[in-house]
Amino acid sequence: MTQLSSTEVENDAAETGPQSDERREAWAAQMAEALGDGFAEHHIIPGSDLWVRVTRESWADAATAARDQLDCQFFDWLSAIDWLPSPYGRDMDAQEDNPEPKSADPMEQGHAGGETRLQMVMRLYSISEHMGITIKADLPDDDLSVDTLISVFPGANWHEREAWEMFGIHFNGHPDLRNIYLPGAFEGNPLRKDFPLLARRVKPWPGIVDVELFPGEEGP
Amino acid sequence: MTAVSADQRQQLAYVATQAADARLNVEIETEGMTLNIGPQHPATHGTLRLVARLDGEQVVEAEPIMGYMHRGYEKLAEVRTYPQVTTLINRIDWLGSFANEVPFILAAEKLMEVEAPPRAQWIRTVLFELSRIANITLFLGDMAVQLGALTPVFMAFRDREFVLNQIEAATGGRFHPNFDRIGGLKDDLPQGWIDDTKQTMEKMRDFCDEFEELVLGNEIFQARSRGIGIVPAEVGLAYGLSGANIRASGVDWDLRRDGHEALAYDQVDWKVWTHPDGDSFARYWVRLQETREATHIVDQLLDGLPSGPIMAKVPRIIKVPAGEAYAATENPLGEMGYYVVSKGDLVPFRVKIRSASFSNISITPWLLKGVYVPDIITILASLYFILGDIDR
């Protein structure tokens, strides 16, 4: 009997869980208080995740605040997102060099919004709370630079080098911005959406038959 | 014996100090030497190159150089449909391939709001743990071989084969199962598999017991690993160390227990092993205990395996709704996670792969400062990395 009632309670919690998430709300409020004007927006998927967008100027402050006030001592990862819809289309097999944009989609940023094409993302995690936070920051097109996090988390060093070579983002104060994966003379930033995938240029992808329709089936 | 005059005595003292100075100068002016280890070196499990600047026998500065195996999976994933991506990410940590697929599938399921049926979750967890055993078994032999003991690695390769056979029997692939699907699994378990696996787990427990005596109890092993390469917990966390590496520094954190992903770990009784020392020995010790614990997890899961379907209802052509999701699991090497950005298309818009070895190895410039040359190999071995997991 007690067994039964305890599972019922759990089920109730699971049902009410997705509507609100007090712990993540509290985290977002704490970040907003610590950063003041530097805090732009936040987004919560209850029971799942928290996104916070900050201004570029308070990027390093946000990391410090999360580490000191939210106890996020674990540096998970850091990277960037290029929100430009790929000019080569989904399959990246355009055969011309600078194609007209295939999709007319406007640029649409994800959770916690944003205005610019390139956005920084980092994820920190709290060992004591067992909860993570994803922090984003917009980078204006004419000045792709942001402060380095090495003084806050030394582990950011390699992640920033990767973001530097893959997206062309400059990290102010980084002591050692060199290629980490690519050969020294490599030109371009491969993870940007306007960087063509040369393998597809040479030979179109045969695997796309995977999504061919059965006769009579409706398209995706 | 002739008497020595005061003058001569002074002269002798002068010569003696000159000679002492010269000896000192010789020592101080030793030129630094650069030692290049790799990219092809047996201690680097692949093509990691390590450039160490030495002062005598001590390392002044060490820098890993990677990229020899960079395959650009983050870019390639942007042009493949969700089910096709798993064939790529199988090859990140090639010794524990099934474990690579799980977090990606979980991230996609999160976005689609699909949940795999219980039986699929349990089998996923079983295969996940089998990958862990197969992966860490090799480490247990390999670290010993890098300290000069050749026998353990042959035993490790021999016994790992039992586990790989079970993985192959269930999935069809020894190394690259490609078995996980959005919403469940490709297939159910074959007949008789459960009993065979339990027998294999028995063998693996024997293997662990044997290694506890053979390697951990070995005097030379202890002398070479105790107090070597100590990682304090807070430094490890700031560098992003995860998995057994951080548990060996006393941090009681395991995503299998503390994560939010829907796997069956909360249904079984098991323990997270930690060690307070943070040295090479502790890292080996924790991994050995984890392997044994994993065999118990598998046994319990197989005993309680629920019946039912192994696939949830998902459309044949998978289109993932727009959104962002991050899913991470405790892989054999540490935390592995995928940050998936979807625009509601057949292909992901961006996939950020958080691989454990990349962060684990990023501590080496800090950790190798001041250690002796023979310890470089011990420390690298004890951090345990797979090159594919660094270079992606």
Image: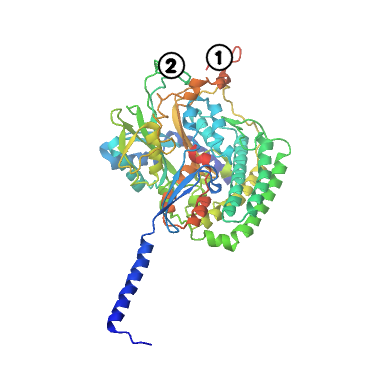
Who comes first in sequence, dot 2 or dot 1? 2
Q: Amino acid at mark 1?
A: Glu
Instruction: Please name whichever residue, B297 or B303, is drawn nearer the observer in this view of the structure.
Output: B297
Mark 1 falls within which chain? A
Q: Secondary structure at mark 2?
A: loop
Locate the N terminus of chain A by quadrant.
top right
Looking at the image, what colour scheme do you see? rainbow
Mark 2 vs mark 1, CA separation in Å: 31 Å
Q: Amino acid at mark 2?
A: Glu
**Is B148 situated left or right of B370 in this image?**
right
**Which label number is shown at residue A218?**
1
Image location (x, y in percent) of residue A123? 41, 39
Q: Which residue is mark 2?
A: A96
Mark 1 surroundings: few (<14), some (14-19) or many (≥20) residues within 10 A: few
**Is B212 situated left or right of A74 in this image?**
right
The answer to whether dots 2 and 1 both sit on one chain is: yes
